[in-house]
Amino acid sequence: MPAERKQRDVIERFLLSVTAYALCVAIAWIAKFSGLTRLSYEALIAGSLAILAYVIVVYLVYRTGLNRRIEDSVFTRLQMLVAIGWISLFVWSAEELRGAMLMIYLFVAMFSFFTLSPRQTAGIGLLISTIYGALIGLDWWRGRPDFNLIVNVVQWCILSAALLWSSSISAYLSSVRQKMRSSTRLVRTQSAELSSTNRELETALARLGHLAVTDELTGL
């Protein structure tokens, strides 16, 4: 891992996010073997290889330090949009497992806590909710066999409520971080002032010590 602390933290967060990709792909393959997805084997293989290539490319970007040329929040949003796109594809193709696949959306939203502002986190949540609502509308319009509109709408409401809750948590954590940064700056300022005062006191004490043992008239 890089010696720089910030870069190392970024890579560790990215490797943690890779688990969401792995979970998504694993569930998709399980669904395919169980006959619970509409994706063909060719599409599933292509999608899995594309995700693997994407993960490798992003990891190399982090390891080479190229991400330093891009604002962290911009790069994070780009990764989250890619993740939302892949997850939406698997959610749309799932049958009975659609409810379980929705949990991965929450994993994506949780990673926004690290670098995105509360407003940006809320935007990601709104995007996820809108995309899933559009998938429900698409299935209803196409008349998908065994499509239960009520169940899907209830799942959409639960997902939206969870995303709203995560946005609230993000705002709370952001305020806590802001208070901690303010407290840290205050402590550093007070520490600098205390050090300056201590130096002045040491100078004054040295002057008093000199006056205590020296005659002002003769200098003896």
Image (spheres, grey):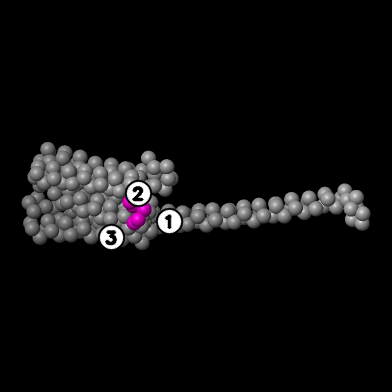
Between disc 2 and disc 3, the foreground one is 2
Q: Which residue is mark 2?
A: 65
Q: From mark 3 to mark 1, how far is it between C-alphas?
A: 19 Å
* Amino acid type shown at disc 1: Ser
- Kindly check if marks 1 and 2 are in contact, taking CB atoms under 8 A apart as contact: no
Nearest to N terminus: mark 2 or mark 3:
2
**Local SS, label 2:** loop
Mark 1 closeness class: few <14, some 14–19, many ≥20 residues within 10 Å: some
In magenta, the rendered stretch is 65-70
Main secondary structure type of the part rendered in magenta: helix
Horizontal side of 55 relative to 47 (left or right) equals: right
- Numbered badge on residue 128: none
Secondary structure category for the residue under label 3? helix
The residue labelled by disc 3 is 126
Density class for disc 2 (Cα within 10 Å; few <14, some 14-19, many ≥20) is few
Q: Quadrant of residue 22?
A: top left
Instruction: Indicate which disc, 1 or 2, sits on the residue closer to the N terminus.
Output: 2
Numbered badge on residue 174: 1
Please report the residue visible at 23 percent of the width from the left and 47 percent of the height from the top.
Answer: 54
Which-is-in-front pick, marks 1 and 2? Answer: 2
Residue 141 appears left or right of 119 = left
Q: Nearer the viewer, residue 111 or 150?
A: 111
Which element type, helix, strand or loop, lies under badge 1? helix
Q: Residue at x 28, y 55 (%)?
A: 78
The residue type indicated by label 2 comes to Gly
Pick out the residue farthest to the right.
218
Spatial separation of the CA atoms under disc 1 and disc 2: 27 Å
